[in-house]
Image: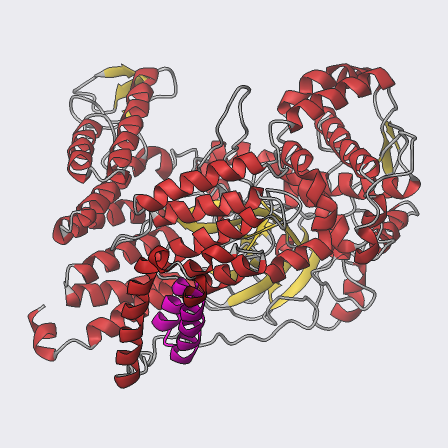
Amino acid sequence: MGNILLPCAVTTQTESVESPSLEIFLWRQSCATRIVLLEQGGWTRNSKRILLPAVSHRSEEDEEAALVQLCHRAPTDKKPEAASWYREQGNQEFKRGRYQAALRLYSKAASHELPGSPEVSVCFANRSAALLHLGHFEVCLEDIARAESHGYPDRLLPKVLLRKAECLLCLGRLQDAQDVLRVLESKIALDGVMTTHLTRLKKLSQLKVQLGEKERCPEPARGEHGGTRGEPEIWEENSRISGASSSLSLSFDAERGRHLVASQDIVAGQSLVKEEAFVSVLCPGESLALQDGDTAWDTRATNADLYCHRCLRQLLASVPCQGCSYAKYCSQDCADMAWQQYHRTECSLGALLLTLGVFCHVALRTVLLAGFAEVSRLVEGSHHGDKNPQSPEGNCRPLSEADAGAGSRGVPGCDSSGRYQSSYQALFHLLPHTEHHSPEHKFLCTLSVVALCKQLQAAGLEAAVLSQESPQQWSKAKTCEKTSDELSPELKTVAEAMLRHVLQLQCNAQAITVMQELGPGDGAVVDKKPVRLATGFFPVLSLLNHSCCPNTSVSFSGTAATVRAAQPISSGQEVLHCYGPHWCRMRVAERQQLLSQYFFKCRCPACLEELESGAKSVVSIRNSFCCPKCQAQMQGEEDTLCCSNEACATSASRDHLSGRLQDLQQQIKKALDLLRIGKADQAVKMLLKCQMDAGTFLSPEHLLMGEMEDHLAQVYATLGKWQEAARHLKKSIEIVEMHHGPSSVETGHELFKLAQILFNGFAVSEALSTIQRAEGILSVHFGPQSAQIQELQEMKACLSELPRNILQRT
């Protein structure tokens, strides 16, 4: 394989909210020989790079064989037999009236059909029928257009033309609907066999009647409620930091590295950073890899089915990649842009990228987006003694307004004018922590990167990576002329950059999260939970250092991140972000253990207070076990816990109580499964029993007690018992406030659900006050333009328009 150079650290910044993960642990077995050689032979070190020793070709062949075998479990090629199976499953769901499920199955079918085949047009046409039933008329028309452009059979056209006319009618486009109906009538007349179109003729006559009625009595224009749109945020961008507010300044010192400081007083809810990810890669979600001997394909939907692979918008009717079955997009524009920027290189490597994991995928896409010229320039510069900002000679002092222009030129990632941009240069200067990673981790990262580069070379993709050809030329070059296993000098440069990025990601990757609906999402109360959607690089967001008690809140819209002040921040105070383990969710010992992956020891006020006082954390007390006899708190650090009530003196095994907790969680899961299949009455009984059991050994303030109250509220809302639902949700909110605080985002989400329940239960005055409180909290964390704020304002407008006598009664 040759020698690969690992770059040394060049900054002191760390940032991430996700655990490092190279999803190739099965590969370790075949790498064991090399790891032993590595540990015995050691590393050759100097001030600028680390040299990996070359090893025998025999072990390399073993590793390649093992990797190929793993890739077979994550296929991304198109399989027409899979398309037929998914289409049939979609037809069955459509007949049952499960249009959402049918929609996703038709999308899966379309992704497996060969481009240009008549079958793919049938998938789009079938999907348009599901979209019509779901009321997505505009998207239905788009799918009908796709079906027609992909050669939809002429004998079936009357069916889709009728569907098209119905959509246009529903959208109020009367003239267009009339034109389609004329075409449809002429087609049926030309067919000659009228009996085959009797049903369509009947539907056609009904549509013509509806069309005439709409022309006689046009619907009044729908006006928007005044004031329901949030006021636009005041934003003045920083002249020295792209995407940052003018209320921030960039500072640098040896201890904290690059960091952001408030240059003026900041109020809660104020936007501080608005940044598009330099690169983002969708996390595939739960693996759907087939097991040996499987004869059917999985119908479950994952992130890869639900979100656009480029912009991360939620998918309704996906546009599949023409080369693979994995990549799906929200529009043809997104598909074309992704192909031009990176997917033309990634397309044939899908199985390998899924096997190596999202960090390797991010590393590859990063160099593709940056372009070889910029990658080569920065890699070459790192070999020629670039000034190390960690040295005493570095510019290790805070930047003031007076010297920002000159001083910021010495800060890593800034350009020659002293401006810090969300650019590849800033990304390249994030710290890879080479000296801190374990030898095994570095070795596996190196093997992964080299395997990827060798595949690029073997597949004839090297020229595309190096940007040496146009997209028109690209389609012609499918094979590689090289026969040598040795990487070219250019690919070695790419490999070095990719290896740097894989190592950077452990401390600088940002998990892009989204609030995902639980269940079908068609109920009166929508329950959501945050899920990791993608992994990305955000150079400006990476300037924020960690605190377990942060003063900011981060939210995402597609690939864009917004940082807002979660509380007032005084001028001169550092702006801080939580990398994951928040003080109110986890004890200090557990937080410190998790944070060790970032290679620093947290000394934030929350950690120092817990460590120095020696007092038991509030998290431990609230999430503790209680005595089965007297309900006092159980205490002790050993395997046996004792009742804190001296008069009781009951003891219990920690393992026994932990086992009861796990059993309880399983029972709750079963209850929720019953709710999902429509057995709400049985779910209530099971949850009430779980609640009684929990009360015998869990603290009343335990988070699980709050979760059960939340689940009960959900079930009662499903049954339309709004008062009962509100009563349980209020108890849940009390426990959430104890754990997370009254102005936390968790409390805001619970208040949002309570507002929905009170709105549906017609408790007007209480609903209005709850809406106001939820709006105040959520606008701080997500801004006035967020979807939840808009929904709250629409509910408020609806309630405010009720007659005065009703408002007074309620």
Q: Position of residue 345 (x, y in %)?
A: 75, 46
Q: Residue at the far bottom: name it.
A: 216
Quarter of the picture holding the N terminus: top right
Quadrant in the picture for residue 353: top right
**Residue under the image location 73 percent in, 41 percent down:** 432
**Residue under the image location 36 percent in, 51 percent down:** 746
User: Does 75 sit above or below residue 391?
Assistant: above
**Residue under the image location 42 percent in, 49 percent down:** 103
Q: Nearer the viewer, residue 761 or 340?
A: 340
User: Does 46 sit above or below residue 543?
Assistant: above
Badge count: 0
**Residue under the image location 17 percent in, 34 percent down:** 682
User: Does 809 sit above or below residue 34?
Assistant: below
Q: Position of residue 387 (x, y in %)?
A: 86, 51
Q: Position of residue 201 (x, y in %)?
A: 32, 64
User: Does 453 sit above or below residue 10?
Assistant: above
Q: Nearer the viewer, residue 763 or 449?
A: 449
Q: Position of residue 12 (x, y in %)?
A: 71, 47
Based on the picture, tell me whether residue 181 belongs to the magenta stretch. Answer: yes
What span is colored magenta in the figure? 161-187
